Image (cartoon, rainbow, N blue to C red):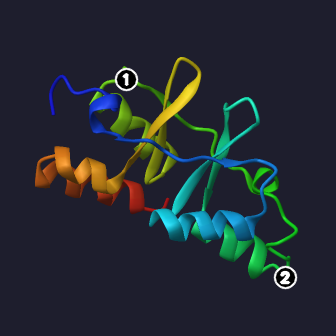
Amino acid sequence: MSGETAKDLMSSGARCIEAHETLDRAAQLMRELGVGALPICGSDDRLKGIITDRDIVVKCVAAGKDPSKVTAGEMATGLVWVPANATARDVLAKMEEHQIKRLPVIENSRIVGMISEADLAKHLPDDQLADFVHRVYARS
């Protein structure tokens, strides 16, 4: 892992959901892409936050709201990201600090990819991955 950057670790081609799109559309896009989270971008293609499948279920459906009327922008959370040239150590520290399992990667003010647990699993030794998972899933 030494010398690797966020750009080396990430899965490229992250598809954004625009902030004005509804949560039912976000859910459909997640299904099409086989992902559990989407970055939310404004019309300027700039990151506004992230939405997860769990956000849709817990903060919308379980709260009695209509996913065809709530926008992704209304649910935007977690404006946490790393620059493409961040070190692998910086990536892990950021994910651990914020207790997150997905992290957008930004280059030239645009999202260029996402780092997930699956991406980390490809690059981290087993013991380091186990340590990361333990810290991220630990609740204080």
Looking at the rendered structure, the kind of residue marked 1 is Ala
Marks 1 and 2, how far apart at CA? 40 Å
Crowding near pointer 1: few (<14 within 10 Å), some, many (20+)?
Answer: some
Whether residue 57 can be seen here: yes
Whether residue 35 can be seen here: no
Disc number placed over residue 64 in the picture, else none: 2
Q: Is residue 116 above or below residue 32?
A: above
Residue plotted at (75% across, 56% down):
72
Q: Is residue 139 above or below residue 101?
A: below
Point out the tag, 1 or 2, that comes first from the N-terminus: 2
Q: Is residue 13 left or right of residue 53?
A: left
Residue plotted at (48% across, 51% down):
99
Residue that extends furthest to the front in the rendered view of this protein: 32
Disc number placed over residue 105 in the picture, else none: none
Q: Is residue 53 above or below residue 75?
A: below
Q: Is residue 55 left or right of residue 84?
A: right
Of the 4 image quadrants, the one containing the N terminus is top left
SS of the residue at dot 2? loop
Q: Which residue is mark 1?
A: 86
Which corner quadrant of the image does residue 26 belong to?
bottom right
Residue 40, position as x, y percentages in the image: 66, 46
Q: Is residue 140 above or below residue 80?
A: below
Crowding near pointer 2: few (<14 within 10 Å), some, many (20+)?
Answer: few
SS of the residue at dot 1? loop
Q: Is residue 86 left or right of residue 78?
A: left
Which corner quadrant of the image does residue 70 belong to?
bottom right
Residue plotted at (53% across, 71% down):
31
Is there CB contact under 8 Å for labels 1 and 2?
no
119 or 125: nearer the viewer: 119
